[in-house]
Amino acid sequence: MGFFDKIKKGLSRTKKNLIQNIESVIVGYPKLDDEFLDDMEAVLLSGDLGLATTEKVMGKIRQGMHEGKIKETGDVLPYMKDAVAEMLTADNEGSEEVMHHPEVILVVGVNGVGKTTTIGKLAAYYRNQGKKVLLAAADTFRAAASEQLTVWAERTGSDIVKHSEGADPAAVAYDAVSAAKARDVDVVLIDTAGRLQTKVNLMSELSKISRVVKKIIPDAPHQTLLVLDATTGQNAISQAKKFSEVAPVTGVVLTKLDGTAKGGVVLSVHEELHVPVKWVGVGEAVEDLQPFNAREFAEALFETEGDILEKDSEAGKN
């Protein structure tokens, strides 16, 4: 399956929670009025878009009404689809591209979001692109984290640099980047500890890792990917804000999108944090971590039964 089919399947619970509620509001109001807009706003808030993002979407709906692009309630859903795609497209392309040699990617996030598994899946993706990959086991605080990453290295045919449990994470990162240069590696993926925002010392360690790799490659890390669990909804936003304070997060990996009715958090992350969603996880399989495609996400999220029937009809003609 391509991105559209995977994301469509993964968003099934979100569609039931958000899109069906939007459709209920549209069906329930014969005309556009303030009461309709109030109910629409309430539905968006319940879909985990967050206050700031909901206000922006509602602003676009009102703009569409003012410009005559939304003339009746039935125009709202297709208009929203285009508006959401436009909002998500900004700075959201090229997540899979390797622009440097080596490309140093720092991967951060709290425990339990699927960070190490995400690194393994990213390694598999880049290996399938013919890239030479090296994993850095800099999560030295969590028991068995290094072993887990070693399994992924073996599974994907990637190199790995690791130290003993409890070692200095920055030292692991330093050795890994040094090895990457020596071995002509294309991509370095650095695992880090689950940096709970309440543990300032761990946040400091994250900053230290960034400083250390710059001693070898001055413009590294080239990407800092923050892994968030979509099932936590707006709690993921607060996590992201804390990480953004200590590291220049360049993109978000949103995992477990297939297990949540809170898929609206994709839009919330992008709009409230001004950080693009680069990858999404829509299943357990290695290939279920996909580079994010804003247009296809919007198409899948806002696809209605009418759209499906129209596509089937067009396919039948062809």
Image (spheres, rainbow, N blue to C red):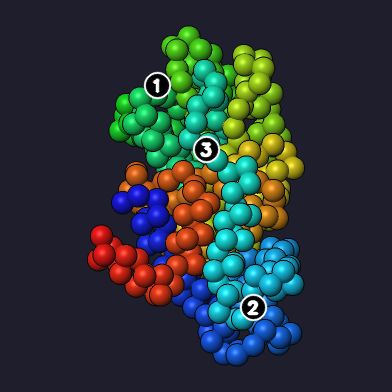
> Label 1 vs label 3: CA separation?
17 Å
Residue nearest the viewer, comparing 197 with 56: 56
Number of marks in picture: 3
Which residue corresponds to the image point at 55% horizontal and 30% vertical from the top-left? 105
Q: Which residue is mark 1?
A: 132
- Helix or strand or loop: what does disc 1 sit on? loop
Instruction: Give the mark nearest the N terminus, 3 or 2.
Output: 2
Determine the image quadrant of residue 282.
bottom left
Q: Is residue 41 left or right of residue 266?
A: right
Q: Amino acid at mark 3?
A: Ser
Which residue corresponds to the image point at 30% horizontal and 33% vertical from the top-left? 155
Q: Which residue is mark 3?
A: 95
- Helix or strand or loop: what does disc 2 sit on? loop
Quadrant in the picture for the C terminus? bottom left
Q: Which mark is residue 71?
A: 2
Q: Position of residue 84 (x, y in %)?
A: 59, 60
In this picture, is 284 found above or below 206? below
Query: Mark 3 near mark 2, Cβ–Cβ under 8 Å?
Result: no
